[in-house]
Image (spheres, grey):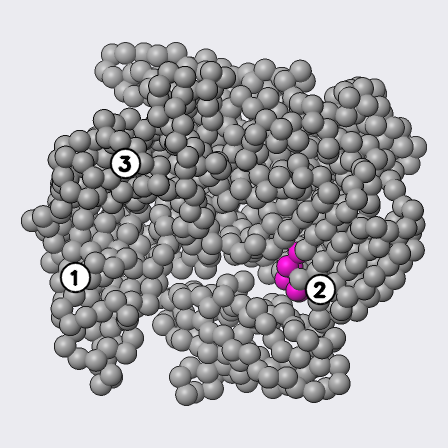
């Protein structure tokens, strides 16, 4: 038996950890049962930890128990496994390297450009440069770097690393990340270190209204290149005011949302000097996967009815654009990027553009606030985001690649007097470097396409933060993330990604316990004042760590974030009426139900939605009681259980008479959140089935209840109805989008706004854990309980869990499963028969079953 897929803190060979006692993970290959393991860790030639032979089947969360780790430590570790016959296999090796753990480790100084920024002005990208010699043999070279903004670094003309839009998106009021790069192979004798810094999330446009200067007016750079020589000496080249600077390079404007203005005829002069500045935050390691460039797409060229030339990349993505062009000096290529063509076949951005306030003295413009109340801003409104590239040719062969903007698009309108060769253009998908963990296929090709649409929407929105869409708002709406968490974990490895985002959640929580509806903070105070604490969104501070715990078996997440979870629970309790109904605060409610059920936005914003809020009070308190019990917080457990029971009683007292409705969400919610039992539960289940049938098996739920719709029908014993809803091709439905040519998931069922919102794709969880039947059931354990039906002739899924890859496939009356080494699975057949399966492949007869 041999260990494979070795990781440290969920990461493969991480460079720059700042976790004092990191944990180790692996899967087993060959053999049946792991009976023991041994970890040996070395710092160079020194053994700093030898666990000895540990009699255990554990493969996850094995904590460091060696000597204390210090900054820059490079640790090589080997794990050896013993199998069921007590035979040791070949050892498997990996490594990790610690980052800078102390404030004093930073010897570089914060620098900025030599100009005085004005509040509403926009500026070119800052270009910094330092020259240095390495006349001795260098055996180790590390670049530690961060920015208030986003950076790209080049050493001797070669790009440093492959991270995109680093250092990433955080709440810059509380947290700033840095990256570490091994640059040994980029060095020569005489060296040039160039760093470009753009506005990014720090100074550039963020949120739906394109707010700028949210965290500051001045972009900044901090870096240090640490060199270790063969003779044992060391040298550090740190950022300081000796660095050359200019902002006269080719990128004349760069904004995440609005795009880039690029003049290929310019090169940085570096005629000025950087200025010293300060920053109160000490950079921290991200301990996360970074955004990178991934799939490259090639377009076809089409001409619209009006004669416009449009590139169709065939897939809606979030990412960059690259092209090669030869034109006369001063000739321009202007590209505008969008998701769809309109009903006339013309390029449009109207499905995602908002109106951005642009201040003008003395001018007032009326606006509608998210609370539904009328407001006024000083100035006028302009469309945002622009999603535009304005490129000027140098006169030779020019190469362009986006650096400091990111676009949500499938189509690109190209305006130029030059000929357009589609082969000269490409689109590059950019998202956090999460590996794929799950695949699902079945005999319905449209269902398969919808799964891929969901995966693409996830890629388009998981760029360091789980955003709502990559076009209009681009912010981490917490309700979207919490409903999608389990589907996300089925599709890709989100372990490190969501641990980072939990810090964003905590950073944005007020001292009252009230969370923002978005994380990280995006500069809109109304997201605290109006929607902060809205149930289903605010509850993310409980639901995401709870689901993380259940998915990955990581109780440390509960310990680390319990104060955040508890503070929100106490905030809810404070706002609960004496009768345990939750009747305070602005509530977003069942966001984006099909249009016929939808409340006007203003009504949703102004009126506390007691039904939704009280249901979530019960649900959240129930989970908090379980968490408090797991952490031995007995007093808290008693308090939370009291409010869970009280909220359930209040809900039934207030709403038990409202279940005779065709509004599916009002029936799904009490079923999914555990608010009805016994005969009343059966009555609500029957009424849900009737409501679905009355709508012709079309979806009738919004963001909060869509993930629960098909599970609620299945739990009612009506998987046949669930399958009909899944495969319905009439809008509103998932497959209606596929039939309309969608390549990602739409925000609303009508397809009138963003065409890249992952939240409605949360239904994919049902495909994995019900259709294929794969569920994680604790450490080293699975349940495989498929529910065939819906006229499908086969369905198959694989899931690479923390404990290994498990598969399930049913076809022609046979269920085939694969259980990974060192795990077991309970197989529950459609007729109710149960089997226990160990590692290996197994087949079971399910002939004649249909739901």
Q: Residues within 10 Å of mark 2 (few under 14, many from 20)?
A: some
Q: Which residues are magenta?
A: 799-804
Circle nearer the N terminus (1, 3): 1
Considering the whole magenta stretch, tell me its main secondary structure.
Answer: strand
Residue at 73 percent across and 43 percent down: it is 443
**Residue 277 showing in the rendered view:** no
Q: Residues within 10 Å of mark 1 (few under 14, many from 20)?
A: some
598 and 615: which one is in front?
598
Q: Is residue 205 above or below residue 462?
A: above
Q: Specify whether residue 801 is painted magenta.
A: yes
Determine the secondary structure under disc 2: loop
70 and 294: which one is in front?
294
Residue annotated with mark 1: 192
Residue annotated with mark 2: 779
Residue annotated with mark 3: 260
Q: Specify whether residue 505 is painted magenta.
A: no
Label annotation for residue 134: none
Circle nearer the N terminus (2, 1): 1
Q: Give percent across and percent down for residue 831.
A: 92, 50
Q: Quadrant of residue 397?
A: top left
**Residue 371 showing in the rendered view:** yes
826 and 661: which one is in front?
826
Determine the secondary structure under disc 1: strand
């Amino acid at each position: 038996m041999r260990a494979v897929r070795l990781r440290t803190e969920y990461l493969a060979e991480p460079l720059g950890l700042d976790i004092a006692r990191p944990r180790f993970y692996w899967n087993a290959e060959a053999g049946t049962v792991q009976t023991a393991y041994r970890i040996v860790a070395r710092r160079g030639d020194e053994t700093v930890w030898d666990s000895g032979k540990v009699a255990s089947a554990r493969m996850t969360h094995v904590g460091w128990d060696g000597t204390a780790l210090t900054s820059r430590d490079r640790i090589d570790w080997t794990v050896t496994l013993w199998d069921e016959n007590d035979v040791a296999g070949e050892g498997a090796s990996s490594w990790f390297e610690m980052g800078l753990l102390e404030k004093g480790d930073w010897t570089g100084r914060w620098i900025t450009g030599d100009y005085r920024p004005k509040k509403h002005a926009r500026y070119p990208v800052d270009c910094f440069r330092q020259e240095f010699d390495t006349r001795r043999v260098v055996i180790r070279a590390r670049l530690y770097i961060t920015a208030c903004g986003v950076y790209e670094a080049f050493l001797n003309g070669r790009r440093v690393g492959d991270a995109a839009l680093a250092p990433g998106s955080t709440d810059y009021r509380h947290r700033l990340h840095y990256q570490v790069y091994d640059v040994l192979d980029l060095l020569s004798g005489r060296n040039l270190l160039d760093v470009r810094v753009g506005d990014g999330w720090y100074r550039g446009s963020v949120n739906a209204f394109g707010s700028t200067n949210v965290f500051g007016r001045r972009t900044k750079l901090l870096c240090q290149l640490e060199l270790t020589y063969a003779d044992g000496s060391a040298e550090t080249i740190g950022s300081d005011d000796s660095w050359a600077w200019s902002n006269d390079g080719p990128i004349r404007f760069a904004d995440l949302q609005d795009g880039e203005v690029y003049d290929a005829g310019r090169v940085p002069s570096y005629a000025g000097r950087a200025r010293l500045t300060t920053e109160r935050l000490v950079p921290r390691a991200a301990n996360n996967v970074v955004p990178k460039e991934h799939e490259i797409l090639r377009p076809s060229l089409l001409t619209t009815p009006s004669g416009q030339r449009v590139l169709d990349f065939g897939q809606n993505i979030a990412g960059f654009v690259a092209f090669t062009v030869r034109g006369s000096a001063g000739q321009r290529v202007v590209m505008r990027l969008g998701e769809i063509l309109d009903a006339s076949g013309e390029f449009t951005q109207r499905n995602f553009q908002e109106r951005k306030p642009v201040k003008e003295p003395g001018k007032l413009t009326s606006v509608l606030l998210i609370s539904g109340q009328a407001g006024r801003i000083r100035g006028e409104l302009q469309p945002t985001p622009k999603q535009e590239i304005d490129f000027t040719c140098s006169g030779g062969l020019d190469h362009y690649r986006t650096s400091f903007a990111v676009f949500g698009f499938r189509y690109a309108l190209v305006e130029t007097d030059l000929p357009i060769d589609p082969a000269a253009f490409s689109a590059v998908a950019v998202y956090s470097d999460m590996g794929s963990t799950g695949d699902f296929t079945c005999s319905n090709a449209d269902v398969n396409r919808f799964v891929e649409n969901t995966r693409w929407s996830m890629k388009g929105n998981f760029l360091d933060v789980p955003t709502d869409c990559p076009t209009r708002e681009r912010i981490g709406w917490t309700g979207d993330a919490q409903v999608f968490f389990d589907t996300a974990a089925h599709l890709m490895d989100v372990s490190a990604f969501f641990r980072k985002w939990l810090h964003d959640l905590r950073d944005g929580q007020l001292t009252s316990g009230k969370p923002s509806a978005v994380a990280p903070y995006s500069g809109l105070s109304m997201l605290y004042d109006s929607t902060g604490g809205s149930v289903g969104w605010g509850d993310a501070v409980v639901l995401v760590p709870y689901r993380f715990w259940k998915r990955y078996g990581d109780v440390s997440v509960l310990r680390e974030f319990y104060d955040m979870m508890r503070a929100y629970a106490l905030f809810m309790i404070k706002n609960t009426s004496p009768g345990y109904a939750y009747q305070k605060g602005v509530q977003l409610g069942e966001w984006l139900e099909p249009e016929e059920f939808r409340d006007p936005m203003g009504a949703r914003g102004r009126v506390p939605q007691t039904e939704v809020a009280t249901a979530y009070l019960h649900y959240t308190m129930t989970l908090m009681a379980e968490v408090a019990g797991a952490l031995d917080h007995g007093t808290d457990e008693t308090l939370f259980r009291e409010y869970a029971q009280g909220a359930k009683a209040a809900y039934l007292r207030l709403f038990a008479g409202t279940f005779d409705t065709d509004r599916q969400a009002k029936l799904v919610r009490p079923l999914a959140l555990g608010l009805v039992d016994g005969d009343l539960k059966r009555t609500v289940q029957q009424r849900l089935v009737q409501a679905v049938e009355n709508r012709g098996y079309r979806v009738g739920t919004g963001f909060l209840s869509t993930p629960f719709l098909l599970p609620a029908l299945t739990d009612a014993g009506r998987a046949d109805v669930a399958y009909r809803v899944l495969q319905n091709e009439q809008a509103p439905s998932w497959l209606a989008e596929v039939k309309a040519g969608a390549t990602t998931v739409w925000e609303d069922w009508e397809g009138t706004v963003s065409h890249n919102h992952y939240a409605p794709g949360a239904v994919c969880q049902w495909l994995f854990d019900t259709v294929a039947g794969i569920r994680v059931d604790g450490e080293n354990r699975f349940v495989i309980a498929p529910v065939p039906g819906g006229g499908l002739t086969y369905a198959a899924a694989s899931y690479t869990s923390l404990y290994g890859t498990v598969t399930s496939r049913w076809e022609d009356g046979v269920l085939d499963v694969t259980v990974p080494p060192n795990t077991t699975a309970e197989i529950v057949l459609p007729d109710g028969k149960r089997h226990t399966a160990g590692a290996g492949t197994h087949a079971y007869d399910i002939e004649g079953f249909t739901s």
